[in-house]
Amino acid sequence: MDYKSILSEEEIREYAKKHIDDFREGEISIDEIGDGNINYVFKVTSKGGESLIFKKAEKLLRTSGRPLDQKRIEIEQEYLKIADSYVKDKVPKIYEFDKGNSLIIMEDISDFKNLRTELINGNIYKNMSKWVIEFLIPILSNTSDIVDDAENKKEKMRFFINPEMCKISEDLVLTEPYNDYKNRNIVYKGEEDFVREYIYEDMTLRKEVNELKINFMNNSQVLLHGDLHSGSIFVNESGLRVIDSEFAFYGPAGYDIGNVLAHYVISYITSSVENNKTMQFMDILISETKYLYDKVFKKLLVALIEKANAFYTVEYLRKYVNSIKSDTLGYMGTEIIRRVVGDTKTKEIEEVSEFNRIESDKALIKFGKYCILNRGEDIKGDDLVDYIKFLL
């Protein structure tokens, strides 16, 4: 089949019957479940109830027709394979990858629910931070120079060079929220003066973000998911699954950690301002935020000490992890600010009522800025919690 032959649902049906044993006989149902701009995602179900996910990378943006680099789907499946080798049952299993058709056929994770949607609906999971840490630590340790063979790591770094997707992050996360040179920022009405004073005109903030951007672009520290947030994490009572790794690349470890924490904070602050969640939900969410921040660095240090060769001293490994902690604070801040000021907002932010929107956005911006400007300090989980509550 050539690339275009599987664009339609009927052609996906024929592809499933040809390549997957359980789909050779009987009727097949196909539902498009993705709503993204750069991929098609289908759930394909056999007559017997077996189901798979077909994810196909488009050559063109579905809205504008702009060409896209299809290597991203190859990067996505390779990241999922590597992640699965380190952390079993934390990512969907890959059943087939067709490079020529830019197609991944993978496990259906319909038993799991989108974490962002769950948090919006007031559903909380007491072990979600434990599961996130169990996902992160093996990848962030094993793909580092501390543990991985230098030659092997450089070969993987070569494969994961991902300029198109990294450029999106460099612009939308680490540049435009502070310098709206493309006029793409979306500042909520009534916040213009605040955003100008607190973000655009603050050159101390700009300097710190400059450093975070250059670090993002040049520090090939570990293999990153690259877009790890509550929208790419699925959960149920038994655990989690992480999806959508097409932004994967070798970069600073704190970027993935900071992104997850940022979305915990976005959920907490928007919920607090709206006063639309139970006290139990709020208590667990802030506890999970503190747990993730306090535990992830301790567990990373333990993993590195256990796996590092004898050349690396414990004192150096502590310094190494402390630098990741500093980066985590910085990237937590940049992710929060870009979701408020930039053009890719989260549902939690967009659904805050008009009456509370400015209060919510200002609190998020102040917290994000606090993280960026204080990333060199010895900030503990209690400090983050205290500052969030101070803002509210």
Image (cartoon, rainbow, N blue to C red):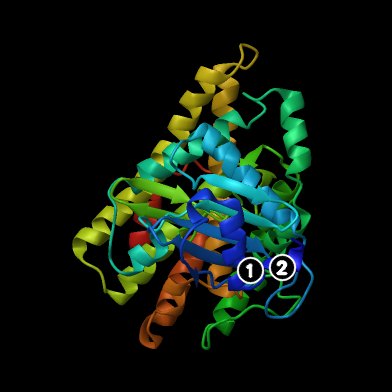
Task: Tell me the residue at 39%/58% (across/down).
Answer: 110
Residue 129, above or below 4: above
Check the picture and name the quadrant holding the C terminus.
bottom left
Residue 217: image x %, image y %? 74, 49
C-beta proximity under 8 Å, tags 1 and 2: yes
**Whether residue 201 can be seen here:** no
Check the picture and name the quadrant holding the N terminus.
bottom right
Give the label on residue 152, or none.
Answer: none
Judging by the rendered image, the residue that carries numbered circle 1 is 11
Q: Secondary structure at mark 2?
A: helix
In this rendering, position of residue 122 left or right of residue 174: left
Q: Amino acid at mark 2?
A: Ser
Task: Tell me the residue at 50%/40% (across/down).
Answer: 136
Residue 107: image x %, image y %? 48, 51
Residue 387: image x %, image y %? 39, 57
Q: Quadrant of residue 38?
A: bottom right
Q: Secondary structure at mark 1?
A: helix
Of 372 and 46, the residue lying toward us: 46
Of 276 and 234, the residue lying toward us: 234
Real-space Cα separation, disc 1 to disc 2, in angstroms: 6 Å
Of 197 and 298, the residue lying toward us: 298
**Whether residue 125 can be seen here:** yes
Task: Tell me the residue at 31%/56% (across/down).
Answer: 285
- Label 2 CA crowd tier, 10 Å (few <14, some 14–19, many 20+): few
Q: Amino acid at mark 1?
A: Glu
Judging by the rendered image, the residue that carries numbered circle 2 is 5
Task: Tell me the residue at 74%/38% (across/down).
Answer: 157
Of 330 and 97, the residue lying toward us: 97
Residue 185: image x %, image y %? 64, 78
- Label 1 CA crowd tier, 10 Å (few <14, some 14–19, many 20+): some
